[in-house]
Image (cartoon, helix red, strand yellow):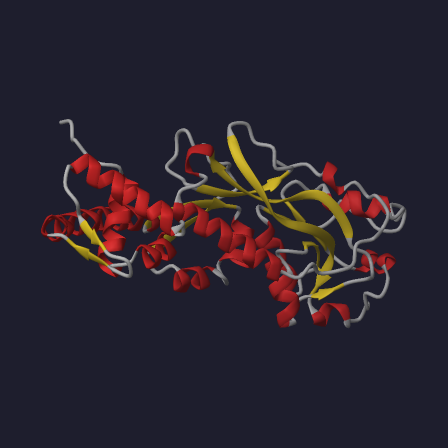
Amino acid sequence: MSYQLPSLNALRAFEATARHLSFKQASHELCVTPGAVSQQVKALEEELGTPLFRRFSRKIEMTEAGEQFLPHIQQAFKGISEATDTLMHRNQAGTIKVSLPPAFAIKWMAPRITLFQKQYPDIDVHLHASARLVDFSKQDFDLAIRWGFGKYTGLRSEHLLSVNFFPVCSPDLKEGPYPLEKPEDLKYHTLLHDENRNEWPLWINTLDLGDVVDATRGPSFSNDGMVLQAAIDGQGVALGDSILVEKDLHSGLLIKLFDIAFPTNVAYYVVCPEEKWNLPKIQYFREWLMAESKKTEMVGDHDTRDYRLQDLLGVV
């Protein structure tokens, strides 16, 4: 169906002028000059073929035609406004499905997610913890947190959190029969590994401690969360990701060992399909993530040497 409609700007100028009975006040509301409002109304009157206002030297009054026209225009604007609000609310509300690594989900996201829910109660966040990379083309996910370099074909990504690595253990283990005061003391303790078992050998060999500490010994676990829990339980020493150990360090469950923190150019990234990147609910969640990341303390000073922990396997 084709509609014969006047200019929307002219209708807005008329409606604002009619409410205020003033071109000047209408111009303030519409952020244009009084002359522009007057010209818009005049153009509308010419298009309609009838005057809508009587103009006097110091005031204006509505004509009978203007008074009859006004409620219809206001009703139309109200309908447009309500439809817009409904559509925006639908886009802002709903559900966000997020895929993220298990340890990151438990150690970083889970303690914070209620803050997002309080800020956006109409948006439900479903967290799915998995080490397996989500395929957005085949799986119903809106967003993912990935550990890697931030380059993902066909997807938008945004840097979320940088990472340091350093040894951590329980307070009791540090002060036990074989105190951990220098890296060489690791020879007396069990090393806790992730399933790749490559981080400790790289760390030990970088410090030229291969003849002192056997980096291959010790149990391995299928994810970082299990490694850190074993460290908390006093089973050995873990090589901690600064983001994942933040909460446990603050609570005193873990202690950072030595004065060495290895930097890496691998980081946590927010990843999303291009077509969903600017959806309001996705924008709100991304902005919240970025705000929370700024609150996260980078634990441990960067050592200035290049240890190339970016060469660790398992990076995606």
Rendered location of residue 298, percent (x, y): 69, 58
In x, y percent, where is residue 164?
A: 72, 52
- For the point 32% across and 43% down, which residue is it? 39
The reply, left or right, for residue 37 in relation to residue 232 is left
**Image quarter for residue 264?**
top right
In the foreground, 38 or 31: 38
Please report the residue visible at 55 percent of the width from the left and 57 percent of the height from the top: 291
Q: How many marks?
A: 0
Of residues 84 and 38, the one drawn nearer to the viewer in this rendering = 38
Left or right: where 69 falls relative to 105 = left
Q: Is residue 89 above or below residue 7?
A: below
User: In the image, is 46 to the left or to the right of 25?
Assistant: left
Query: Which quarter of the rendering shows the N terminus?
Result: top left
Residue positioned 15% across, 37% down in the render: 49
Residue 55 visible in this rendered orientation of the protein: yes
Q: Is residue 255 left or right of residue 290?
A: right
On-image quarter of the C terminus: top right
Query: Which of the pair 216/12 is nearer the observer?
Result: 12
Measuring 39% from the left and 30% from the top, which residue is drawn there?
138
Do we see residue 233 in this rendering?
no
Residue lying furthest front = 57
Give coordinates of residue 80: x percent, y percent. Answer: 22, 46
| Picture layout, residue 2 above or below residue 269 | above
Residue 73 placement (x, y as % from top left): 17, 48
